[in-house]
Image: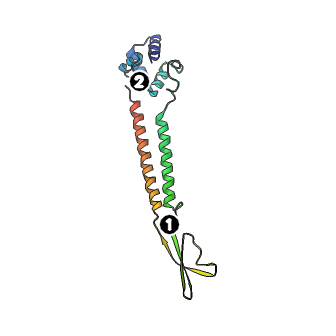
Amino acid sequence: MQALGMELKRLRANKKWTQAFAAREIGIQQSYLSKLENGQFIPSAEVIEKLKLCYGQNCFDKCLPINSTKHTPSNITLIMSLTLFMCGLIAWLCAAYEIFYPQTYFTYQAKLDDFLAFNITQQYQGERFIEGDVTYQIVGERQVSRIENRFIVVGSAVGIVISFVIALLSQRHRFINLKPR
């Protein structure tokens, strides 16, 4: 980063600015600018943008690593957080509306002389249905809370909470990095 420090000093000298004046123009503290010029600190992406605004867009292309200006981890974490939130929300809705594991069961009874049979199914077959030579008649419908749906609801709630935590932490990190040094 010595090359960046020398370039900063050269650009400041060309404009005939003092270090204090340059720091005010850039929007950082003078001590931080001094450490940048001496190669003691590596500037964050936000500070690089401020330097480019002050000194010109193409001044630092030779001095900076290729990916330092395009690296935005907070945007990536926000996208990941939003994706996790959407997946959690979709999973929760699927569990709440019984899309994966239906919770309604129908009980059918067949009577034929001494023959008594019950058929429990998740699919509604109508008030009566015939299977072979036996006629079944509906005797009940019940709601069963399936454990699979509970796991999906809890898992999706955890995913949603984690997505909020990730989003808040990435935003907090972003605001800490924006403070002048």
> Nearer the observer, disc 1 or disc 2?
1
The residue carrying pointer 2 sits among few (fewer than 14), some (14 to 19) or many (20 or more) residues within 10 Å by Cα, namely some
Left or right position of 73 against 32: right
Numbered circle sitting on residue 27:
2
| Disc 2 residue type (three-letter) | Gly
Left or right position of 133 against 167: right
Total numbered labels: 2
Numbered circle sitting on residue 103:
1
Q: Residue at x 51, y 53 (%)?
A: 90
Residue 18 figure quarter: top left
On the image, the x and y values in percent for residue 143 come to 48, 70
On the image, the x and y values in percent for residue 114 come to 54, 88
Residues 176 and 20: in front is 176
Quarter occupied by the N terminus: top left
Quarter occupied by the C terminus: top left
Q: Residue at x 40, y 31 (%)?
A: 177
On the image, the x and y values in percent for residue 134 come to 61, 81
Q: Earlier in the sequence, mark 1 or mark 2?
A: 2
